[in-house]
Amino acid sequence: MLSRRALLAGGVAALAAPPFPARAQNAAPTILRLERRSIEVNGRAASVYGIRQPNGTFGLTTEVGKPFRVRVENRIEEPSLIHWHGMTPPWRQDGVPGISGPPIPAGGSADYDFPLRFGGTFWMHSHQGLQEQGLMAAPLIIHDERDRPDEQEVVVMLADFSFTPAEQIFENLKKSGSMAGMAKPPAGAMASTSSMKMASAAKSKADAAPDLNDVKYDAFLANDRTLADPEIVKVEPGGRALLRIINSSSMSAYHVGLGALEGELTAVDGFAIAPIRGRKFPIAVAQRLDIRIELPPGPGAYPVLAQLEGERRQTGIILAAGGAPVSRIADAADLASPALTLDLERTLRAEKSLPARKADRVHTLNLTGEMAGYIWSINNVAWNKDVPPLPVATGERVELVFVNETPMPHPMHLHGHEFQVVEIDGERFPGAVRDTILVTPGRRVVVAFDANNPGWWALHCHLLYHLDAGMFTTIKYV
Ligand SMILES: [Cu+2]
């Protein structure tokens, strides 16, 4: 167990101290309030959601081995429910309305209590309707033995922001398909027509320019701010920092760039990998990156930027060492970035693989859809309550084969289990353990997991409007 230490960024507060010494079992839960709040984006006030403790701390920072004991108070004017992304709770506490349980009504609350099996960088977000687009999301950081006392923790939450209400964005997408008035055609991409049938076009399009960024956003945020007024984090010259990058965007993937710094990617989705050095790392929707950096001696300002895939637009924070002056960074890079690929994913190797084992069961999930009407599906079935869950039995090693038959990338997320990436396009390897895997157009990606957490679990694309349009299914063994 790691020793308690002063937290350098973000504030600790996570562990509400009871007024009297109490046995751990009786410790009061941490309160997380779902609230409306106001932020400023591009000089304009925006009403968004937040998940905060009574003292204002966003989300929760805790330690592995401690129970996750939380009370969620719903202080917004509508029902809500929070999913603990990447956690493996009992399924009734997973926070998916209609699957794990009912949403929390306005003014109500819900209690959570489960053991934390592992540490790392996780997050929490609403799974109710389209609330996630309104920033109903927060960090969930679980310290463990990997954390170093001499390392400053810097959490960076990325988000895409629109002044257009999420329901309106979704309506516009449904009205005119992917190439809606909301979106502009991706650079270099053939203008696809709204009547295009993606499933049939898929294989030949595997290497064509992918269809990215359906929604045209007003801003991209890092810790609620744009590069016009970015967060500036004071760091020690010559010191160490651990960047915990969380992509809480509804629809947007990025290239995270460290500029002049070189970093070491040590974990993805909270799980340790054999470290990879670099200056640029891709992050798909819902994924996390843990990047260790060492700052040069002397003063300096170091932007950590996230550039939208396929575009010039970017967001980020600035690390400022030794009182160095910070200059303004443009919110657009000089050149458009490429689309995310699986090139890095193929090279990732888990520090701790799943035990070698043959699959007892294999489910193939063809990722399918139709631009007309913005219908997204799995095996050509758009999710509804009557779709039977994929069968699984306790104790089985299960492999999920994702085959992307569409021209859009899909970040696929399984609830309640960590999985290991074991194959990309026919090549087997002991890849990263994680909870969200990007499946790019035309690709086949296989993940393996152990069915060790009986329940009814969601399995879906994490692009918010794809998920809501039906690229969602469940597995059930309970
Ligand atoms: Cu998708």
Image: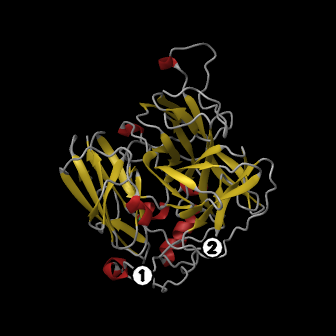
Q: Which mark is residue 312?
A: 2
Q: Is residue 311 left or right of residue 448?
A: right
Q: Is residue 14 above or below residue 175?
A: above
Q: Is residue 117 above or below residue 330?
A: above
How many numbered markers are drawn?
A: 2
> Counting residues from the N terminus, which is met first, the one under dot 1 or under dot 2?
1
Q: Which mark is residue 208?
A: 1
Query: How are the residues colored?
Result: secondary structure
Q: Is residue 17 above or below residue 213?
A: above
The secondary structure type at the circle numbered 1 is loop
- Front one among 404 and 420: 420
Residue drawn 58% across the image and 36% down it: 32
Q: Which quadrant of the figure contains the C terminus?
A: top left
Callout 2 amino acid: Arg
Q: Can residue 247 be seen from the camera position used here?
A: no
The secondary structure type at the circle numbered 2 is loop
- Front one among 109 and 157: 157
Quadrant in the rendering for residue 20: top right
Q: Is residue 4 above or below residue 334?
A: above
Q: CA distance from mark 1 to mark 2?
A: 20 Å
Q: Are marks 1 and 2 in contact (CB under 8 Å)?
A: no
Q: Can residue 243 be seen from the camera position used here?
A: yes
Residue drawn 39% across the image and 45% down it: 351
Callout 1 amino acid: Ala
